[in-house]
Amino acid sequence: MKRRTLLAGLTIGGLAMAGCSNSSSGGGGGEAVDVSDTEMEATIEFAAWESDFDWDSVIKGFNGKYPNITVQITKSPFKEFFTRLQTQASGDNLPDAFMMNGPNFQLYASHDILVPFDSAVEAGELDFSNYPEAMEELYTYDGIPYAVPTSYDSIGLWYNKDLFEKAGQELPTDEWTWDDLHETSKAISEALKDDGIYGFAGGAYNQELFYNLIFQAGGEVLNEDATKAQYSSEGSREALQFLRDMVEDGSSPSIQTTADTSPDELFKSGKAAMVYGGSFRVQGYVDSAVGESIQVVRLPKGKQRGVVLHGGAIVANASSENAAAAAAFAIYHGSEEGQQIIGESGASIPAFQGTEQAYIDAHPEYDLTIFPESAEEYGFPYPVSANTQAWLAVESDMIPKILAGDLSVEDGTAQLDEKIDALLAEEADQ
Amino acid sequence: MTQAETVASAPGGTADGAARGGRRRVPNPDGIWPWLFVLPTLLGLAVFYFWPVIQTAYYSFTKWGVFGGAEFVGLDNWIGLAESGQVPRALLNTLLYTGMLLLGIPISIYIASLLNRPGLRFSAFYRVLYFAPFVSMPAAIALVWGMIFNSQYGILNQFLGIFSVPRIYWTSTEWVALIAIGIVGIWSSLGFNIIILGAGLRSIPSEMYEAARIDGASNWRQLISITVPLLSPSIFFLTVLSVIRGMELFDLIFIMIGDSNPIKGDTQSMVSLFYREAFISNNKGTGAAIAILLMLIIGALTVVQFWVQRRRARS
């Protein structure tokens, strides 16, 4: 194991060889840990991706409860975070606690790398009913939770009041339907054509755009046990067709345009009157040129209401000597106290329901309450499987083609399902 | 490895060495000493080049778990790669890009000879100007060019719009994107090419040009009949380097072809395909197979180039 790891590190060019101290065979995962001893002594390494979270305050709060655990934080840019983590995992050199996201979670959970939190739930240290249901679902693998949610993102319809006024259209409401969105977008695009302004900036994002529409149309991305892709299900096709129609009649810019200039850039520079934007966009929107003339409402409804929920979490490394201390840190950060601190940084909506007020209060000029409200009322978990990244690569090749009209919705989704099914079948073998 | 070899031997050496005919075996009177002197370098090469290459070749026959633990699967990765049908297109894209980089060499010869005209004012300034792209970060270059190529707000389309050229989607139209990337590639390699060619130009004695002028040869004729033939060692050196650099295309694609781009799947290079398999899809075995394939292709192209050069030198 040790030898192979060293070679692996060399080949891929990572520096995994630095630490092979832990010569356990990598098994060891899956054992429960006890976090009840608040006097335990340890020094743990916590790896986070760079973000606006105020980790120092969280650690300070944590030390109020566990005074003898020192938390050392290492940060890396999000783009490198998971590549780095994988290299560390291959070298049996993972940090004691680290941040996790939906697309990568099952990969780690399925390889017995993470501390299971079911015993903490039984002991009453952790209660998932405090978090949105979709978050629990996202971070549960084979019926066992392996992560403590940090925060979540929800999506809303942002609009630019000035552009609506200019085009003489009525402002969107929480009660809007897809048809309202389409008609108004078209009217704005036509009225402001000479200024190069679009009614709606669509693009081809999944979390911020088409996953929401798929759920609203009653479709699915993956089936229940994530063994089959469902892009060709009726609802999914309807959602993609809707977006395709918006592009075709000019309500929304061409996919080639949004490939060059992202939808939120178009919105921020006043070139689009509406955009589907995540709760995490607030900071960027406030600072933009349109910051003072925008507002947000709930996503328009299709057959039903729906919003895709995704959020980060903290996990603990099961093979670490300090697994208990790491788990204690993860659990603390997900407690009401820890979540309060996270909310105050205003970076994202804290996952603990009832602590979102700090996030909302950070920008009273916007109706940010719609984010936690819609998440709680009709949030759908972000679709994941054991190797999500692999099929996401296929998705991000094909969906833009479908929306651009290079492939028909029917053929495109059929091909997409076929390719992704093959990848999901491969996952099952692993 | 090919690269190191080329650097050592290309300018000058190869041509006249080969012209003398077959290799002669020189008895080595120094025994083991020369080996001891190169040992530190060889050791480094062995540990950081040869061994990883051998390992990568081995891993291309294994299924490599996401978190380590390789299992021998014979030719599965190679067969899977052939069946996926991604390689021919990626290879074609890479070769087209490489071809475009080679077009940069004649352009570089032209600019280098302009810069080396005797009595040119500010020539040092121009040289810095042309060399600047070469020392800039590729990622920064790709970002800036991405803005220039932006279909809606990019300066290039604005400029073409003056002549009522319809809007061109530079980075999101199949094949066109490859040309856009090629333009950036040529632009950023000019500086290096010009420096190398400039050095070659300065070694051409000025008497030859004087003699040609007395015989009534035009500037163009001088370029074709004197400059280019006498520059051929430098040109050969640049050809070999350009091919290797072209085959390793990655960063321009990675940054200029965004994630929601409809042509993303059609505009992969060999290296971006490798990145995708190894680090996105977690098929490190398949990734290793692509890496080995690419190495073999670059090796073969380099061998062919040397062979052509040797034949030409002999004739």
Image: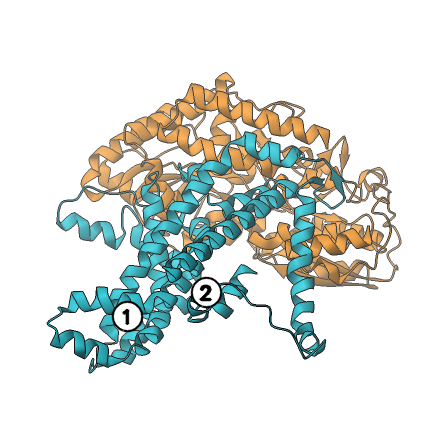
Secondary structure at badge 2 equals helix
Quadrant in the rendering for residue B174 = top left
The percent coordinates of residue A388 (x first, y second) are 61, 36
Any mark on residue B18, and which? 2
Q: For the point 84% across and 52% down, which residue is it?
A: A324
Residue toward you, A213 or B128: B128
Q: For the point 18% across and 50% down, which residue is it?
A: B160
Pointer 2 local density, CA inside 10 Å: few below 14, some 14–19, many at least 20: some
Q: Please tell me whether residue B280 is drawn above or below residue B134 in the rendered image.
A: above
Q: Colour of chain B?
A: cyan
The N terminus of chain B - image quarter: bottom right
Q: Earlier in the sequence, mark 1 or mark 2?
A: 2
Q: Chain of mark 1?
A: B
Quadrant in the rendering for residue A249 = top left
Q: For the point 74% across and 53% down, which residue is it?
A: A97
Q: Colour of chain A?
A: orange
Left or right of B78? Residue B109 is left
Residue linked to disc 1: B112
Q: Please tell me whether residue A288 is drawn above or below residue A130 in the rendered image.
A: below
The percent coordinates of residue A147 (x first, y second) are 72, 43
Give the number of the mark in front: 1 or 2: 2
